[in-house]
Image (spheres, grey):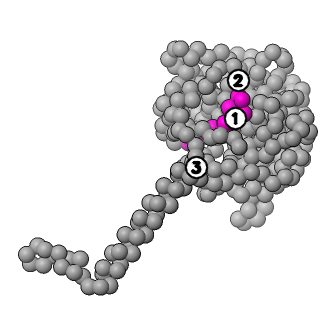
Amino acid sequence: MKLNRDGRFIRGGLRGDRSFRLILVLLVLTIAWWVLDTAGKNPGTQTGHVHAKDLTEISGIVLSRHHKDVIWAHNDSGDEARIFALGTDGKTLGVFRLEGTTAIDWEDIAIGPGPLAEKDYLYIADTGNNALSRRTVTIYRVPEPAVDTTTTSRTQTLTGVEVLPMRFPSEPRECETLLVDPLNGDIYLVTRDRSERTKEVASVFHAPGPHRGGSLQTLKALTSFVPPASIRGGDISRDGRFIILRSHSLRPERGALLWKRSDPSSPLHEIFSDEPINLPVRSEPQGESIAFSPDGDFFFTVSEGSQAPIYRFEVP
């Protein structure tokens, strides 16, 4: 439409009206699709958002097993060697520096057993390797520290951190996913391997426990599978029955892959020969983090970015 000399709209012809209507219909359909995609396919609930101003590149999370509604998180490369304790509402409860460690490219964090049976341990994977420049990577292990959920954020230093060097058997690998078996403490690394121009293969490597600080272990290649998109994070439920991986898929309905183990004592890698359950997640700009709740009834995701939302989803 256009204006006449009196400032009134005049019809721009039948073709112009049809074009305008078509654009309007397409706009309505786009909005409707977005609403359905968000409300139907992505049923997660936002529990809060990250408050820490210097926690903007989250690449790994795990839920505490001693403190209710506490998430452990860390930044990607470029940050100090530190982890953050967050509430599920995103408020910062504490910052913990790991003494005697470096942060080349931290990619994931897990929780599992360690030397003392009565303790849970945090495992931090310094395994990022975009340039494929290192064959030996490092896992840091430290007892899960106490968190005072009644106070504001404060910085502490964690001592006694164990260094667990891991070497890939033949060549450097790009790895963003760490899994620790809750039953025996075995460590699994899931790597990203591009076999074809448009396809990535996920390879699973294994380091059996017990693990001794400072002792180099050569990882063993167990299996490979083709995910819908590159694997950026993962977790194992506390009882060992569920394994979940975060897929960097552009389709939110395929953003998480879930496997169920009928026998938690069976070799973990065998589960990847089964077809996973595709679980929907929210659309996230750079979603790399995923973790189960301690009871295994829910899983959480957080993306990179400033004040990133924290989402919780039911496990089917």
Give the CA distance from mark 3 to mark 1.
17 Å
**Lower sequence index among marks 2 and 1:** 2
Picture coordinates of residue 150, whole percent (x, y): 53, 14
Q: Are marks 2 and 3 in contact (CB under 8 Å)?
A: no
Picture coordinates of residue 234, whole percent (x, y): 72, 41
**Lower sequence index among marks 2 and 3:** 3
| Image-based side of 42 in relation to 215, left or right | left
Where's the C terminus, which quadrant?
Answer: top right
Q: Which residue is mark 3?
A: 42
Q: Which residue does the image show at 86% across and 33% down from the upper left?
A: 186
- Is 58 contained in the magenta span? no
Predominant secondary structure in magenta? strand
Q: For mark 2, does the 10 Å Cα neighbourhood hold few (<14), some (14 to 19), or many (20 or more) residues?
A: some
Residue 297 is labelled as 1
In depth, the one of 278 and 158 nearer the eye is 278
Q: Which residues are magenta?
A: 290-304
- Is 292 contained in the magenta span? yes
| Image-based side of 164 in relation to 38, left or right | right
In depth, the one of 45 and 123 nearer the eye is 45
Instruction: State which quadrant residue 26 falls in.
Output: bottom left
Q: Which residue is mark 2?
A: 65
Does 214 sit above or below residue 249?
above
Amino acid type of the residue tagged 2 in the rendering: Arg
Give the secondary structure at mark 3: loop
Q: For mark 1, does the 10 Å Cα neighbourhood hold few (<14), some (14 to 19), or many (20 or more) residues?
A: few
Q: Which residue does the image show at 74% across and 38% down from the upper left?
A: 235
Q: Are marks 2 and 1 in contact (CB under 8 Å)?
A: no
